[in-house]
Image: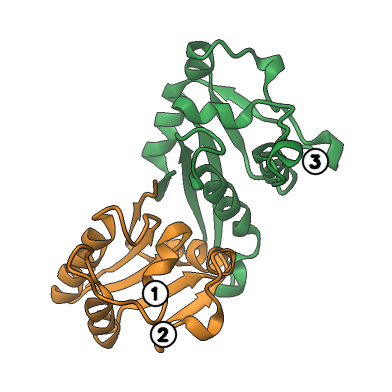
Amino acid sequence: MGAVKLLFVVQRPPYKSENPRLALTHAISSQTAEIYMDDGDSVVPILAFVGDGVLNAVKNQQAMKLYGVTSTESHIKNSLLVDVPVWICKEDMERLGLKEDQMITDAEDLGGELKTKFVSFAEIQKEMESVKHLLFF
Amino acid sequence: MGELTIGSFPSLVGSMSLDFTFRLAEAAIGKGHKVNLWLSGNSVMMSKKGQKAFKDYSHLEKRMKELIAKGMEITVCEACAEARGYHKEDTPEGMKRASMDWYLAKTVKTDKLLHIGGE
């Protein structure tokens, strides 16, 4: 079967529901999914934040201080650390008045090399059409 | 025949999405397809032992057991379950508990993945 591409589309805002966190933890779990797969098979996830979901990628989240839980920011950085691409919809950022310098752009503090990509919705839609499975959160 | 994998996330009580999940699974199995069900997030409570049937709420345990007997594979997200105080000994016979990578691995071979969202 080879590599199967999965697109996780996150459309809900952080902390209001469990969904964005589940999207991130499921995407990260692709790293260990091979224990259930045949040799040569793999899953290749991409995380795309759209609509109010782009709020998940705002930097300097204080979830541990305020709620006593790990932040969505730390999950996004862990995704980048394990080379899960993170895409953020530019049009939705604009709609919410968010600039790139307000967003999580990398996981350099954790030693990650991959950077966040700010993409148009058209690019996300193109990916939606090319992946094997779409997972909406 | 094909293979359908359903990722289910809505809560047991308060929405009819789980009813839809089981009706769809039943229809697919009835047509001869293989169905895998991943219960995650609030959906994990669907598979907890000892639920009492009330007429005010849908009660899916009987249907779930019938579908397991017909070959449906049900796996419960272990972390989501433990976070809700639902432990291994509360898991009914015929069901597995696993981490999220089980679900991701199923996406490789399955013909269709249907993700039924949460709240």
Against B108, is A19 above or below?
A: above
- Could you tell me the amino acid type at mark 1? Ser
Q: Which residue, given by chain and number where applicable, does mark 3 sit on?
A: A112
User: Residue A18 placed where, x, y %?
Assistant: 51, 47
Secondary element type, mark 3? loop
Return the residue at label 2: B92
Element assignment for label 1: helix
Pointer 2 with pointer 1, Cβ within 8 A: yes
Q: Which mark is residue B47?
A: 1
**Shown colour of chain A:** green
Distance, label 2 to label 3, CA atoms, is: 41 Å
Residue A130 screen position, x and y as percent: 40, 41
Q: State the residue in front, A114 or B47.
A: B47
Q: Nearer the viewer, residue B92 or B104?
A: B92
What residue do we see at 35% from left, 71% from top? Answer: B36
Left or right, B100 with reference to A111: left
List x then y, in percent, for residue A49.
52, 32
- Amino acid on which disc 3 is placed: Gly
Specify the chain shown as orange.
Answer: B
Q: Secondary structure at mark 2?
A: loop
